Every structure is written in structure tokens, then in C-alpha cells.
Amino acid sequence: MTKIINGRKIAAEFCDSVRDLVTELKARGIIPRIALINASNDLASEIYVSKKEKLAESVGIKSDVYKFSQGTKESEVADLIEKLNADKSVHAILLQSPLIEGLRFRELVNLIAPEKDVDGLTTINQGRLFSGEPGVIPCTPLGVLHLIRTVHEKIAGLHAVVIGRSSIVGRPMTLLLLNANCTVTALHSYSRDLPDICRTADIVVSATGQPKFVEKNFIKPGATVIDVGVTRITEADGTKKIVGDVDFDEVSEVAGAITPVPNGVGPMTVAYLMYNTLKLACCY
Ligand code: NDP
């Protein structure tokens, strides 16, 4: 029978252990603190930042939200990042994407001190992941790996296919699985024979943002399917809905284990933001 991976429950259990560690750290006089920079003007980012703020509070992490509105100059966000870098009470800095038009994400994210780069997106932390050196690893791939490990005790030697190669999800996911000794295939929009390649995988991670892209015939019977995609769609009757990359109803007929959307990868991403904040507060 197909296992439905309950990301919400797994994330809640993981947050319990983060909360315990935060309590221990506080007893040593360290209050983990994250700065959430919201220089975005889309509703989804507003919701994500608010979720992050709430979860931080629930695990005992202090959070501060910095909101910028349309018309903000890049130098204003850069000045804030420099200020937060210099503030010893701040352990973690997150720059929520997408940014307001006119602000450059790569340039701004690279201003974050690598030891406060909670989502592991600076070129330095990405380079560390590339070379297999310790560093900060992006939250979503960490969450995905955690979910995979709830299904597979050992993943070394398994064939994992990652669809998507963005610097936030696909690329770090590919490297994380490679560093965990999987055989990894990275697929993208230029890949030929994509369904055939997917069908050879023990684990398929999809991060394309293309609704129902992964079909039943892409999946080897018994394979583990992790759906990172989050797309907001409007149904013919006007109802708004969040969907993933995977045709869940069809694919769950063949997969050994599968994540739903919502309540799959999403809660794990936020849980690992807390974990990374804790780690930065402990280790630097
Ligand atoms: P990007 O748009 O940056 O990247 C999408 C990737 O998918 C690209 O590498 C692109 O290939 C590839 N792709 C697109 N269409 C196809 C196709 N038809 N066949 C093969 N590959 C394709 O998106 P992100 O990586 O930022 O996010 C991906 C999805 O994950 C989104 O839905 C996003 O909302 C979601 N997300 C969810 C999170 C969570 O916590 N659940 C966290 C972060 C993101 P190419 O490079 O060739 O263009």
C-alpha cells in the first residue's frame, strides 16, 4: 500500500526537538534570533513570512520582520543587511523571495554574512555544499532529505532523480543527495526522455512549479515521490487551490511513498528554517 508522507506531522515532531534544544540554549544565555526581510509585494510571501514568524515564536526563537514596500531602493535593503550582519544578537538573516521589481536577489543575498545565511543561498555556502564542506544548507532540500529518510533507512546507492535546477531547490537538492551517496540525475526543461529517466529512479523529487507535470507513467512501481511544487490555481468554478507538480491521485496508485501538497514539503521547509537558525546560534 502506498505510504502518504505526512509532512505536517513529521515537521511538528521535528519542531518539538528544535524547541527542546532552543530551551537548552537559552539556559546557556543565548537567545536564537532571526531577521526576516520581506521586500516582496506578493501575497504568498506575506503568508510565508507570517508562518515563519509564528513558528519561530512557538519554538522559542526571537524573530523580527523588516517589511519594505514598492519603490524601495536596493541600497536601503543592503544597508539593513549590513546592520544585521554587524548586530551580534542576530544569528540568522532570511531574504524572502521573490523581491520587488528592480531589486536584485543574487546581489542582495550575497551581502548576507555566510555565518548568518540561514537559507544557505550565498555563493559561499553554495560552494561549500558543492565541495562537500560543512556550511549552511538550504531549508527546502534539507526538509526533503528528512522526508526521504522517513521512508528509506539507507539511501546510499539509490538512484534519485531531481527535476528542476534552481539555486534554491533543484541544485542544492541534487548536491545533497550526491553527498549522501545516491546516484543522482538532474533533469530540467532541456532534458530529453524525461519520463523514461524518471522511471529508472528509486526516488523522484520534483521542483518545477508545473502543475500535474509528473504523471503515473513517469514512476517505477514502489518508488518514493517527493513533490516540492507549489502553484496557486483557480478551478473552472472559481475556487482557488494550491497544487503540486505531481498528479497525486494517479501517481499514488504506483508510488511506494508520496508527499501530498499541501502538507508535504512546505511544513518541513519552515521547520528547517528554525533548525538552521538554532544551528547558527549554537555554532557561530
Ligand atoms: P524555478 O522556476 O526557479 O525553477 C524551476 C525549475 O524547473 C527550472 O530548473 C526549470 O528548468 C525546471 N522546469 C520547468 N519546467 C520544466 C519542464 N517542463 N520539464 C523539466 N524541467 C522543468 O522554481 P523554484 O526551484 O524556485 O521552485 C520550484 C517549485 O517549488 C515552485 O512551485 C515553488 O513554488 C516551489 N517551492 C516550494 C517550496 C516548499 O517549501 N514547498 C520552497 C521553494 C519552492 P530550466 O532550468 O531548464 O528552466
Image (cartoon, grey):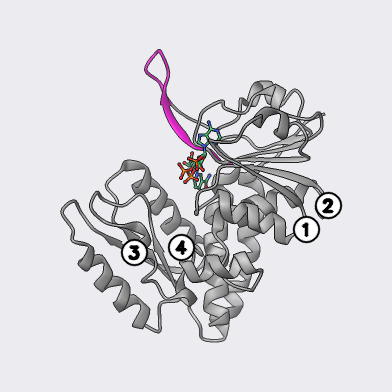
Mark toward the start of the polypeptide (2 vs 1): 2
Mark toward the start of the polypeptide (4 vs 3): 4
Q: Amino acid at mark 3?
A: Glu
Percent of width and height locating residue 160 = 73, 45
- Residue depicted at 79% across the width and 34% down the height: 256
Question: What's the mark number on residue 11?
Answer: none
Q: Residue 4 is drawn in which quadrant?
A: top right
Percent of width and height locating residue 196 = 72, 29
Tag 1 residue: 181
Mark toward the start of the polypeptide (2 vs 4): 4
Kind of element beneath mark 1: loop
Percent of width and height locating residue 76 = 21, 67
Q: Are marks 2 and 3 in contact (CB under 8 Å)?
A: no
Counting other residues with Cα less than 10 Å from the Cα at mark 2, is it few (<14), some (14-19), or many (20 or more)? few
Q: Would residue 52 be seen by someone viewing this image from the given angle? A: yes
- Residue depicted at 84% across the width and 54% down the height: 154
Measure how far apart labels 2 and 4 are at the Cα level. 39 Å
Residue 234 lies in magenta, yes or no?
yes
Q: Which residues are magenta?
A: 228-240
Measure how far apart labels 3 and 1 are at the Cα level. 32 Å
Question: What's the mark number on residue 57?
Answer: 4
Residue 63 lies in magenta, yes or no?
no
Kind of element beneath mark 2: loop
Where, quadrant-wise, is the N terminus in this rendering? top right
Q: Are marks 4 and 1 in contact (CB under 8 Å)?
A: no
Kind of element beneath mark 3: helix
Q: Would residue 36 be seen by someone viewing this image from the given angle? A: no
Tag 2 residue: 157
Q: Tell me: residue 247, above or below residue 142.
A: above
Tag 3 residue: 107
Q: Are marks 2 and 1 in contact (CB under 8 Å)?
A: yes
